[in-house]
Image (tube, grey):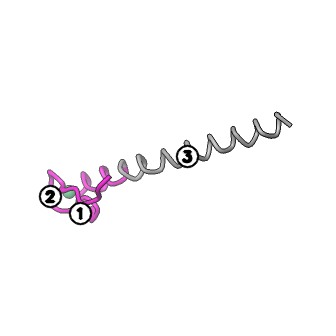
Amino acid sequence: MSYDLICANCSGLVELGRCVVCRDSRERLRADRRLPAAWLLAAGAVLGVLSLLAR
Ligand SMILES: [Zn+2]
């Protein structure tokens, strides 16, 4: 995912967060990035519990 997105509202880089639209998109991008990590953590926790139960 690229951070070099141009804002349609202020024509600045979204990453710079010059206007409300920028900041909103930036937050959404960060949330999208966090999600896979959260899933990996959840999967790891499940695997850990399963390996404990399998013993
Ligand atoms: Zn903007």
> Disc 3 and disc 2: Cα gap in Å?
32 Å
Up/down of 24 relative to 3, above or below: above
- At x 40%, y 53%, the residue is 30
Locate residue 47 relative to residue 7 in the image: left or right. right
- The residue type indicated by label 2 comes to Cys
Q: Tell me the number on the disc at residue 18.
A: 1
Indicate which disc, 3 or 2, sits on the residue closer to the N terminus: 2
- Location of the C terminus (image quadrant): top right
Residue depth check, mark 3 versus mark 2: number of the one nearer the observer: 3
* Of labels 3 and 1, the one closer to you: 3
User: Horizontal and vertical percent for residue 1?
Assistant: 32, 52
Q: Is mark 1 within 8 Å of ligand 1?
A: yes
Q: Amino acid at mark 3?
A: Ala
Secondary structure of the residue carrying tag 2 is loop
Instruction: Give x and y (percent) for residue 5.
Output: 22, 56
Instruction: Work out which residue is located at the far front of the displayed protein and give it.
Output: 55
Which residue matches tag 2? 10
2 or 1: tag closer to the N-terminus: 2
Q: CA distance from mark 3 to mark 1?
A: 29 Å
In front of the other: 47 or 34 = 47
Q: Residue sitting at 24 percent across and 60 percent down?
A: 4
- Measured as percent of width and height from the top left, residue 18 is found at 23, 63
The segment highlighted magenta reads: 1-27
Q: Residues within 10 Å of mark 3 (few under 14, many from 20)?
A: few
Q: Give the percent coordinates (x, y) of residue 31.
A: 43, 48
Circle number at residue 38: 3
Determine whether the residue tagged by mark 3 lies in a helix, strand or loop: helix
Does residue 22 belong to the magenta stretch? yes
Which image quadrant is residue 20 in? bottom left
Look at the numbered disc 2 and say if its residue's Cβ is closer than 8 Å to ligand 1: yes
Question: Looking at the image, is mark 3 or mark 1 earlier in the sequence?
Answer: 1
